[in-house]
Each structure stands twice: as C-alpha cells, then as structure tokens.
Image (cartoon, rainbow, N blue to C red):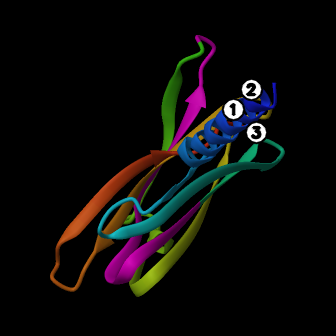
C-alpha cells in the first residue's frame, strides 16, 4: 500500500513538473522573438468615451540604429463580426513610432472610436542595426471594447 501511494505521488509530481515547464506564456507579450528583438508587447486599452489607446513596448538584443513600430493598424469589429482596418499609423505620419540609437523603445497612439465597439491593433515591430540590416515582426494586441 505504501509503495502504491509513493508511486502515485511520484507520478503526480512528475506530471506537475512537466506541465509547469511546458505551459506557454499567456498575453500579448513575446520574449526572445529573434536575434534583433528580446521582447515585444502591444496592448490596446479603452480610455473612455469611445477612445482607444494602443501602446507598444520593444526591447532589442542590443542598441539598434532604429527601433519601434513601422506601422500600427487599428481594426474595428463590424456588425458581421469580422474586423476591418479603420486607422493606420505609420512611421511617416507618426514620428514617435521609431526611435534611433536605442535598445528599448515605447510608443503610444490614440484612436477615437465608437463606444461599445470592439477593437484590436496589429503592430509591425521594426529593428535596424548598425549594418543597416533590419527585421520586422507582426503581433496582434488584445481585443478592447471602447
């Protein structure tokens, strides 16, 4: 009887350890995405009266010549349930999206939406190193109700 109990606890402990190690991270944050990106995060947050704030945070593996997001696209849920792009922020029309000669970058954009409607954003994270070699990664935010 003692042997069965010990074997049962050993099996349960092993299963718990495996589940703990193999459980993926949950959220809109990605760690060690590539040789350029250490971590990336895109977060959509309602700020009241139909307004939506999208924040991006990016940490590079080293100092980059350019770092941030080359584009942030806001998507709005339509009456059909599908999402359509309603606003595109680019490095050309939003200067704060790209920072130069840094290893950490943060940007924030605001969108005037419709109260009670669901939105999410896609960020095109961008890094360019001193050799002018670049990489772009795309990640979606959470869905937020404005």
Residue 91 in the image: above or below residue 78: below
What is the spatial separation of the Cα atoms under label 3 and label 2, in whole angstroms? 56 Å
Magenta span dominant secondary structure:
strand
| Residue at x 32% of width, y 62% of height | 34
Q: Which residues are magenta?
A: 56-80
| Residue at x 54% of width, y 43% of height | 22
Alpha-carbon neighbours of circle 3 within 10 Å: few (<14), some, or many (≥20)?
Answer: many
Q: Disc 2 designates what residue?
A: 4
Residue 5 position in % (x across, y down) = 79, 30
Q: Disc 3 designates what residue?
A: 146
- Answer whether labels 1 and 2 touch (C-beta < 8 Å): yes
Q: Disc 1 designates what residue?
A: 7
Mark before the other along the chain sequence, 3 or 1: 1
What is the spatial separation of the Cα atoms under label 3 and label 1, in whole angstroms? 53 Å
Screen quadrant of the C terminus: top right
Screen quadrant of the N terminus: top right
Mark before the other along the chain sequence, 3 or 2: 2
Q: Quadrant of residue 102?
A: bottom left
Compared across the picture, whether 5 is left or right of 88 comes to right
Residue 19 position in % (x across, y down) = 61, 39
Camera-side residue of 77 and 26: 26
């Amino acid at each position: 009887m003692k042997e069965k109990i010990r074997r049962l606890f050993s099996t349960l402990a092993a299963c718990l350890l495996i589940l703990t190690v193999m459980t993926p991270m949950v959220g809109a944050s990605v760690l060690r995405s590539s040789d350029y990106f250490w971590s990336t995060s895109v977060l959509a947050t309602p700020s009241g009266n139909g307004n939506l704030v999208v924040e991006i945070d990016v940490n590079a593996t080293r100092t980059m010549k350019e770092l941030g997001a080359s584009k942030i696209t806001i998507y709005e849920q339509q009456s059909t349930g599908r999402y359509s792009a309603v606003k595109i922020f680019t490095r050309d029309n939003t200067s704060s999206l790209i920072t130069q000669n840094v290893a950490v970058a943060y940007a924030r954009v605001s969108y005037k939406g419709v109260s009670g409607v669901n939105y999410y954003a896609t960020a095109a994270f961008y890094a360019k190193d001193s050799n002018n070699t670049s990489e772009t990664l795309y990640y979606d935010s959470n869905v937020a109700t404005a």
